[in-house]
Image (cartoon, rainbow, N blue to C red):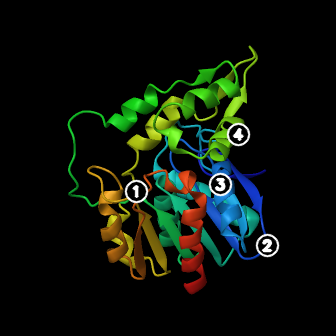
Amino acid sequence: MQLASSTDGVQVAVHDLGGDGPPVLFSHATGLLGMLYLPLARELGGYHGFAIDYRGHGDASAPSNGRFDWNGMRDDALAVLDALELHDLYGFGHSMGGAVLLMTELVRPGTFRALALYEPIVFPPDRPHMDGPPPIVVGARRRRPEFPSRDAAFENFSSKPPLNVLTPEVLRLYVDHGFRDTPTGTVRLKCEPEYEARTFEENMSFDTYSYLADVTCPVLVMAEPPQDLSPSMSAEETAARLARGRYHRFEQLDHFGPLEDPAAVAAVVADFFASA
């Protein structure tokens, strides 16, 4: 693991996932962490993977000002690119991580040779809104943060949604790398529930949608079949608005697709990168 200095006093973590070939930066979803994409990187093959932990997630520190707006996540990505001196690379982004890679390419055009994004959070301004706080925010704040052991955490998450769809290997990576030991002998989430909730709340801190046409590198947008009030609803439209966008739908996966079937997603990404 290597640390890179970002804005707001954040120390961003980046993990070397190994492999030989052109570099690929893996950019995680809200509440998750970079090491979960190790199986995907391994399945992709022919590339050298690096995975970022954004502010307040995984091994990265939380921002000193307590803000989790996505402009800060973009700064984290830029800090990693500068620290590792990565250029002319590929990117894989999942959910929030997909939006952040688009934001990064917008402020630094030519950073990526191509981007493969799974359900990036890019909503049109006129999207429907619900009354009250979104359930995903409420759920994040209610998330159980502490368990007697990593095995207890694994058993808990494997028996209930949403993380029960993850492959056993990915879920084990989540409990092994996403929890820290406490002085009392328990384990606690590195991404505190409040950090996750604030990250969800700040998901419209940058209007990525209005600038999609300015992203000129090839971009693949992948998604599950469209679901109401989910990023899959706007995935095809996002691809269409991009200068060189493509769309791929997975019929049997959901929002956690890259972590529930890494091989299937890697096969599509590999074909895209080869042709981009």
Q: Amino acid at mark 3?
A: Ile
Q: Is residue 156 visible?
A: yes
**Residue carrying label 2:** 20
Dot placed on the residue nearer the N-terminal end, 1 or 4: 1
Q: Is residue 60 visible?
A: no
Dot placed on the residue nearer the N-terminal end, 3 or 4: 3
Residue 230, horizontal then vertical, whole percent: 33, 51
Q: Please give the name of the residue rendered at 33% of the width and 35% of the height, measured from the top-left corner.
A: 135
Residue 72, horizontal then vertical, whole percent: 53, 51
Q: Please give the name of the residue rendered at 65% of the width and 23% of the height, measured from the top-left corner.
A: 152
Q: Is residue 266 above or below residue 87?
A: above
Location of residue 88 (image quadrant): bottom right
Q: Residues under labels 3 and 4: Cα distance?
A: 13 Å
Q: Amino acid at mark 1?
A: Ile
Query: What secondary structure is found at the residue carrying circle 2?
Result: loop
Closer to the observer: label 3 or label 2? 2
Q: Residues under labels 2 and 4: Cα distance?
A: 24 Å
Q: Amino acid at mark 4?
A: His
Query: What secondary structure is found at the residue carrying circle 3?
Result: strand
**Few, some or many C-alpha atoms within 10 Å of disc 2 (few <14, some 14-19, many ≥20)?**
few
**Residue carrying label 4:** 177
Q: Amino acid at mark 2?
A: Asp
**Few, some or many C-alpha atoms within 10 Å of disc 3 (few <14, some 14-19, many ≥20)?**
many
Q: Is residue 243 above or below residue 81?
A: below
Residue 185, horizontal then vertical, whole percent: 75, 17
Residue 33, horizontal then vertical, whole percent: 62, 46
Q: Is residue 164 above or below residue 271?
A: above
Question: Which residue is the extreme one toward the top?
Answer: 184
Residue 52: give its label. Answer: 3
Location of residue 269 (image quadrant): bottom right
**Residue carrying label 1:** 121
**Left or right of 14, for residue 235:** left
